[in-house]
Image (cartoon, helix red, strand yellow):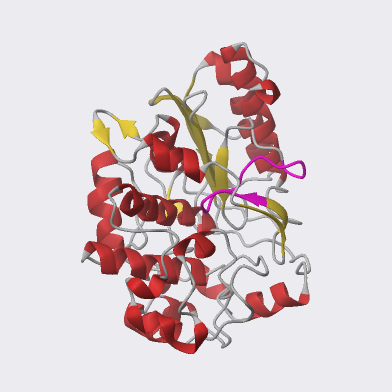
């Protein structure tokens, strides 16, 4: 049996059992799982190994790439600017970034980017990870990018354009670099071990086990978006660890992600510090776009987050969440005050958002536990 460390409140024991089973079966090589309730940790588990030799143990401070789970932090930054009155989600992005308007993009809004209806799911050119991590280059590329189709007409997940566009909006409105805003306003106050980059010499970063095989894209449009970035081998190259790629380069663990999620679960205030107002949290958790995403399939979008859907039920109808390529996730429920996160180094292919077996099992168990604790059926709230 694989050794697991940390603690788990007995009420959440089913999660620990599933976490251990995944490690024992080999579905996970190394991983971390965390849950908070009313702002306090009730689950903080880690176990397995973090190196390709399967020798070095996954430690309390081990971190790993969480790919698109990073977008939850991008979303948080944007919502903070809205809450402060600095950003109108329905105003043209060009109002804050005039050069963005080129090539017919003058009417595109941040709300459309957050709900993946911007008309800019990709760059219409090949990209490398080093391109994506070069902020000045990406600003120029986005400014010169052309619409693929009319904004608001088609839903297609912006794998990298999402973070490139919104990250620059954060930069322009805050006056500081995107990753510095994250550090000052979110991760440092929270004490959350999350960063978009780390030195290539870092020994805390877990090796990544790539998914064995890839499932076919949902549509020709999705295939075109995915074909633009040929970064598969580079994601596991230590030389790419210093690159800041807002949509996907987050390096963290479940404890830190659950801490970020707790801000939402607690209505925007945690440990006496106000991060967000309840109004913007409520808006972010309402359906903004119910669609069949060209890349992800059927989905309900809030403001960037995924919401409860028949094809991939959230733990409760009031939970909103997002996941990263290969299986990581972040989830939060203001109704119960519960937040949760998972980070691992074994990537699994999935048929669509939410279809990873670990993701779906953890979500089901979280719902059952929430029901038991609150005494209210999660589906009746």
- Percent coordinates x, y for residue 286 in the rendering: 56, 42
As drawn, is 323 to the left or to the right of 72? right
Secondary structure mostly seen in the magenta stretch: loop
Q: Is residue 67 above or below residue 187?
A: below
Residue 66 location in percent, x, y?
Answer: 50, 54
Where does residue 125 sit, x and y in percent of width and height?
56, 88
The quarter of the image holding the C terminus is: top right
Instruction: Say which residue appears at 62% left-offset and 43% top-offset.
Output: 307
| Residue at 39% from the left image edge and 50% from the top image edge | 76
Q: In which quarter of the image is residue 317?
A: top right
Picture layout, residue 88 above or below residue 314: below
The residue that appears at 62% across and 11% down in the rendered structure is 375
Compared with 294, 131 (above or below) is below
In the rendered image, the vertical position of residue 122 relative to residue 71, given as above or below: below
Can residue 232 be seen here?
A: yes
Confirm whether the magenta stretch covers residue 371: no
Rendered residue at 34%/80% (across/down)? 98
Q: What stretch is highlighted in magenta?
A: 300-312
- Between 278 and 333, the residue placed more toward the observer is 278
**Residue 6: in sight, yes or no?**
no
The residue lying toward the viewer, choosing from 14 and 278, is: 278
Quarter of the figure with the N terminus: top right
Return the residue nearer the eye: 350 or 4.
Answer: 350
């Amino acid at each position: 049996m694989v050794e697991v460390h940390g603690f788990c409140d007995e009420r959440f024991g089913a999660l620990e059992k599933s976490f251990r089973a995944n490690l024992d079966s080999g579905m996970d090589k190394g991983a971390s799982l965390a849950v908070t309730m009313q702002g306090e940790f009730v689950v903080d588990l880690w176990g397995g190994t973090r190196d390709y030799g399967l020798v070095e143990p996954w430690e309390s401070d081990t971190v790993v790439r969480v790919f698109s789970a990073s977008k939850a932090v991008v979303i948080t930054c944007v919502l903070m600017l809205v809450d402060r009155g600095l950003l109108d989600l329905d105003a043209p992005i060009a109002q804050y970034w005039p050069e963005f308007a080129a090539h017919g993009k003058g009417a595109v809004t941040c709300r459309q980017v957050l709900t993946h209806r911007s008309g800019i799911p990709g760059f219409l050119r090949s990209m490398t990870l080093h391109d994506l991590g070069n902020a000045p280059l990406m600003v120029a590329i986005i400014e010169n990018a052309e619409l693929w189709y009319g904004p608001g007409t088609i839903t297609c997940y912006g794998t990298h354009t999402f973070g490139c566009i919104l990250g620059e909006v954060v930069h322009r409105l805050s006056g500081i670099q995107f990753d510095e805003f994250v550090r000052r306003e979110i991760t440092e106050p929270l004490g959350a071990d999350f960063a978009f980059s780390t030195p290539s010499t870092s020994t805390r970063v877990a090796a990544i086990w790539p998914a064995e095989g890839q499932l076919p894209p949902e549509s020709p449009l999705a295939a075109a978006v995915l074909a633009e970035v040929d970064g598969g081998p580079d994601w596991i190259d230590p030389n790419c660890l210093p690159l800041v790629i807002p949509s996907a380069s987050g390096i963290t663990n479940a404890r830190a992600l659950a801490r970020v999620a707790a801000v939402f679960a607690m209505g925007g205030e945690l440990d006496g510090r106000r991060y967000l107002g309840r109004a913007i949290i409520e808006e972010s958790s309402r359906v903004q776009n119910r669609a069949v995403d060209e890349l992800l399939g059927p989905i309900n979008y809030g403001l960037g987050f995924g919401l409860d859907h028949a094809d991939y039920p959230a733990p409760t109808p009031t939970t909103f969440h997002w996941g990263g390529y290969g299986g990581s996730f972040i989830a939060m429920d203001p109704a119960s005050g519960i937040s949760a996160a998972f980070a691992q180094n074994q990537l699994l292919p999935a048929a669509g958002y939410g279809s990873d077996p670990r993701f779906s099992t953890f979500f089901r168990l979280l719902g059952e536990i929430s029901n038991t604790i609150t005494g209210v059926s999660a589906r009746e709230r």
